[in-house]
Amino acid sequence: MDSSTSGVISDRERALRGWRSRLAMLVVVLLAALAITGLWMYFAPFSIMSQLQVLLHTALGLALVVPYAIYAFKHLKGWWSQRLTAEKLLGYVLVVIVATSIVSGLVLTTQAAFALRIGDLWDLVHLVGGIAVAVLLVLHLTMAYLRRRPRATSWPEFSGSVRRFSAVNAIALGALAAVVAVAAGLWPTRPTTMPLPEGYTLPEYSQNFEEYRGSPFAPSYARTSDGTLIDPSVLSGSESCGTSGCHEQILDEWEPSAHRFAAMNPPFQAVQRNFAADREPAETRYCGGCHDPISLFAGAKDLGSLDLSAPGMQEGVSCAACHSISEVDQRGNADYVITPPQEYLWTAAEGPRKTVSDFLIRAYPRQHLADYDRNILRTPEFCGTCHKQFIPEALNRFGMAPGQNQYDEWRQSHWHSDDASTDLSCRDCHMRLVMDSSDPGHGEGGDERRAPDDGAHRHHGTIATNMLMPEVLKLPHWESQVALTVEWIQGQTIIPEIADVWPEGPVATVDLLAPSSAVPGNEIEVRAIVTNRKAGHNFTTGPLDFMQSWVHLRGVDADGLLLAEFGAIDPDTRYLLDSDGKPHEIGNPRDEGTLVLEGIPLDEFGSKLLKHELWRKAGGVGQRVIFPRYSDSQIFRFEIPVDAKGPITISADLNYRRYRQDFLELVVPDMEAESGVIQRVVTHHSSSKTIALDAQAATVTPGPGAR
Amino acid sequence: MSRGAGERRGSTKRERRLRASVAGTVFGLVGLTAAALWVSARQDTDLGDPNANVTSREREAVADAPPIRFSDVAAERGVIMRHGPGERGRTLPEDTGSGLAWGDIDGDGDFDLYVVNFPGRLGAEPVPEGSNRLFRNDGGRFADVTEEAGVGDLDGFGMGAFFADYDADGDVDLYVTNLGPNRLFRNDGDGRFDQVAAAAGVDDPAWSTGAAWGDVDRDGDLDLYVANYVDYQEGGFGADQLSTSSGGEATIPFTLNPNAFDPVSNRLYLNRGDGTFEEVAAALGVDDPQGRGFAVTMCDLDGDGWLDLYVNNDVSTNRLFRNVAGDREDGTLAFQDLSTLTGIADPRGSMGLSVADLGDQSGGPPDGWPDLFITHWVAQENAFYFGAGRTGAGAWEYRDRTRDLGLGEISTDVVGWGSVLADLDLDGRLDLAVANGSTLEMPDDPKSLQAEPPFLLWNDGSRFHDVASKAGPGVDRAIVGRGLAAADFDSDGDVDLAISVNRGAPILLRNETETGNRSLVVTLDAPASRAFGARVELVTRSGSQIRWWGADVGFLGSHAAEMIFGLGTATAAESLSVSWIGGGETRLEGVPAGAVRVRP
């Protein structure tokens, strides 16, 4: 009896209808397209094509939900009463896995659209489910076909239906592929690199040296992976990292940081102008590798650019500039290779297109992580590439002269250890962990003090000792940066994750040794001892020619009469005074003044370079710094008046300010007045000692220690 | 076939398929998940090697370095002593020294070894084991003759030792620098020395370190320049308490920081010719009161025939004092400080000093200008200043070629001290040996200093490569090295080395490099006043080699009074010429490999 006439659909008819069903064709086409686009995303390299696949995958996935629900219901209903076979079992599994994939896909889509990052577990479920769907779908269809193939020769309708089913699938998939391929081919791309412009000059003198010859970035060692320039918009735009709702906290931290104002700060700009005027603009590339990479790699440090700057210069060491460093060498002087990030679609756009771009980054973060989460960033050598400097002969035209070198100072100090549990490197101190982070990059594996789920990110304010410039420039969140910096200098910073290794208390101390009693009318000797207690490099370190740390020592009698003072600040000129109103001069014999940690470069004629003219540095003089854990000392002598009233109080402050006052006057004379910010003096540590006055001088004894 | 049997068979097949489907699905999903996790882990940027893209090109070793070999034969040859009695007291003087020196005290043609020591804590009763030791070389084996020679100097806190025949009586005398009065041991020619420093006027009580001999005023006798270090005051400061007063954790007392002490002026002693000296450093402007002096050399750095002075200073600026007597009509002695103008005012912590002509400033062959190699403290690369009248018009300038030569980065990890420019494999190119040893304390044992392996830096013609790790167990080990002095103590024609070890036994490194190369050992058979500073040039078919007698001073000691030139595979040198201090040149042609004595 014909089943159609009996009202009961036969197995044969059910199969035929299945292969002829338009809904089935639609669902299978969608599933196949999803599988192909998904596998493409996962296995093919990042490209415009792969990003279009992501968007297509998302759209197809959303389009699948309703048709699949209807189809799955009908298909299950139609076959439910049939005997359980392997084919049917696989069908059930397929239904479950497709459903799982749809649910996980919807979750991932929602996360990518509205959250900070996609979940790792959902991503895994979707990946495994997607591949399983592809495999099971092929198996299910193949088994369904094979089951009836022996009868197909005598059943032309079946063979025709299968052929039609296959053809429709192939045509639909082919059409989709063609559309995507054409779209990818025609998609407008923004070049990230640029050839050297016509007339681009190379610093003449550095061409004498093989290691710099022909380099468009010499006399810096910094270079791009292919020797071309980088569009400044690629390395700038740091704001977009925060305004997209992802790295807002980190952006807030970075905005007032020294890395951020590395190029824009007035002293740097003034020194760079002097440099270009004294030499040729191209030579300022030496500074650009670390201070102004955006302009350096944009080719802006050349004759054609009056301010030697490219758009985006204000970002200094921007997010992209720092995170795009892909190789470093230990020798410093910006010996790094920068590999510009591969851009996602519409990265630089605004509005809905930017939303799509952010969606792509979150949904398909692989390239974003590869470009910005390079684990070379964890290494101290990464920091050392800029925090280790020398003046090459290609620059001073005289011969190599040493420069600041925090990297090797740290490397040789006791803070560096082969034991990871006790080793402290640059970022452990200067990039403390920020707990309860909302940053999508929170957590980190492969780090002794971190875990993938620790919920923290590293503070990108890289707190150190520049408390002046954020305020002068009124950078966003400068108040917070200045407060953290002052805390840091005063030794009030506590970093819980390294508290077992890095003690609390002052970074550097001053202690006093003095006799317990003295005789009026006689000279007294007081010894001040300064100790580098916690700095992981020399104390002080950096540009010693304009930073100042010094001992301010005062002797006062019981009536408050000032008996002697060393290291005061002149209230009018704000110059540092050695003693008795005598301005301090770098390199003076120490018995003529106070203990000042500093150093001054000399040019080839032995003249002091007071304006940071490092391109002329040939030597140095008066350098006084303290290696980690070491101490320095100086004896202060003064006479106690016969009418002084005892006891005498000796007090000592270990002070710090960012700039020599005369440096500011020489280089940026209007900066303080125009900004309304007078640089402050911050005290690292203080000590005092009381000396009785009597007729018999006592022996020298240790001081009481910290206040 | 019965129906029942068929159903059983059918049922079994279906069940097998069902089971296979279930198993395949489960295994497939598990496998897929595992694969996905594996791929994810490989893509996890957190888990990769952070150093994968960190390079250190300047530290790369060379693969085809020659087999330079040394073995430590100190104990078997009889050089047995230990430097530094008792436990380390965490003071600067204890950590600074001491040095050693080679000198042929008995005129038997082989070099004897004097090793400086200190007798315990400053101000404490001297410990007998802390005396300096003199080891007489008897055919390559050594006998301790300290007592009979009378050079133990148990009362002196020893730093350096410098041999020279200052009284021109034909035997070498010995000047010993101390923290406290220096000693001048006059050799009486029969194995004994008389201490005559006070009578001679060279018993400077300051903390002296380096010294150099030379006829600086060209009056025919040997003068002496002495580098002084710092005005060290240990007592009364409560240093131990202070080291913990501010923080609770261990810090280094300031008494270990040379920067905490004022520098002390150097001395220039002019030999009156009657066994006494006149001190003229301040009067001639070469006292360098702001320098914390270490090594010092007297060498005719500008080629005008007069000995100039170069002083290494620790944590203060090095000084080059040009002897301008030659510019004066009457030839009166005077100096000009050209440190900065010549570009050699090195401001770092300078320790040891070696001098020879390594080539011109561009990497070309020797140009006749002395080049200066200087060792430095940690985090400060060593320096190699190549001298030349580079810019024409007679300008005299130095260029630091340390980085070009591969000597920069490798030295930032160590504290370099004694050094020598010597042809270790006799290939005709000067190699470098450097004694390293930190002044930093062991993190877990503040009573001990960190040990570091020495450098044996093989010269490939354009760069140096450290081959110490392949040179044998005597070299490939960490020590707290200080002095390094070279001599062919076993008279086999190659360069052997002695290294002093702070609070350790000295090392005697016998050169066991197997090479087909030959050497020429040159000795100057001339009064010391004419030999010290003499320019010696050897020409072979490979080119010329130029050195200055006694100018390579190392650190706190002196190398043997001989020059060992590598000839490569040549059987003879084409020529050997010596330009004597005071004038005159001796030139020998076709000098065969072996040894030669050159007379004025």
Image (cartoon, coloured by chain):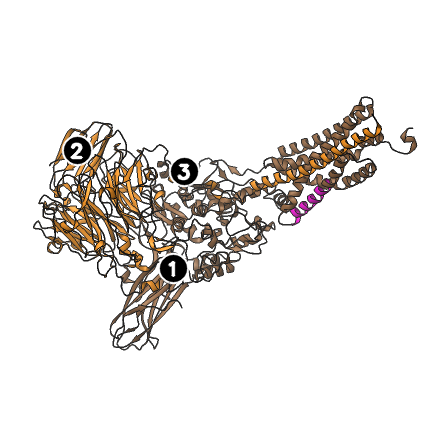
In three-dimensional space, the C-alpha distance between marks 2 and 3, rounded to whole angstroms, equals: 54 Å
Secondary element at image label 3: loop
Q: How many marks?
A: 3
Q: Pointer 1 indicates a residue of which chain?
A: B
Is residue B118 shown in magenta? no
Residue at mark 1: B250
> Does the magenta stretch mainly form a helix, a strand or a loop?
helix
x and y, in percent, of residue A637 in the image: 27, 67
- Residue B75 lies, with reference to residue A40, above or below; the image says below
x and y, in percent, of residue A684 in the image: 41, 62
Q: Sort mark 1 into few (<14), some (14-19) or many (20+) by Cα contacts within 10 Å.
A: some
The quadrant of the picture occupied by the C terminus of chain A is bottom left
Position of A695 with respect to A387 (left or right) is: left
Chain appearing in brown on the rendered image: A
State whether residue B341 appears in this view.
no
The quadrant of the picture occupied by the N terminus of chain A is top right
Is residue A103 shown in magenta? yes
> Which segment did they paint magenta?
A98-116
In three-dimensional space, the C-alpha distance between marks 1 and 2, rounded to whole angstroms, equals: 56 Å
x and y, in percent, of residue B409 in the image: 36, 43
Q: Pointer 3 indicates a residue of which chain?
A: A
Q: Are marks 1 and 2 on the same chain?
A: yes
Three-letter code, disc 2: Ala
Front residue of A318 and B3: B3
Q: What colour do you see for chain B?
A: orange
Residue at mark 2: B595
Three-letter code, disc 1: Ala
Q: Are marks 1 and 3 on the same chain?
A: no
Residue at mark 3: A202
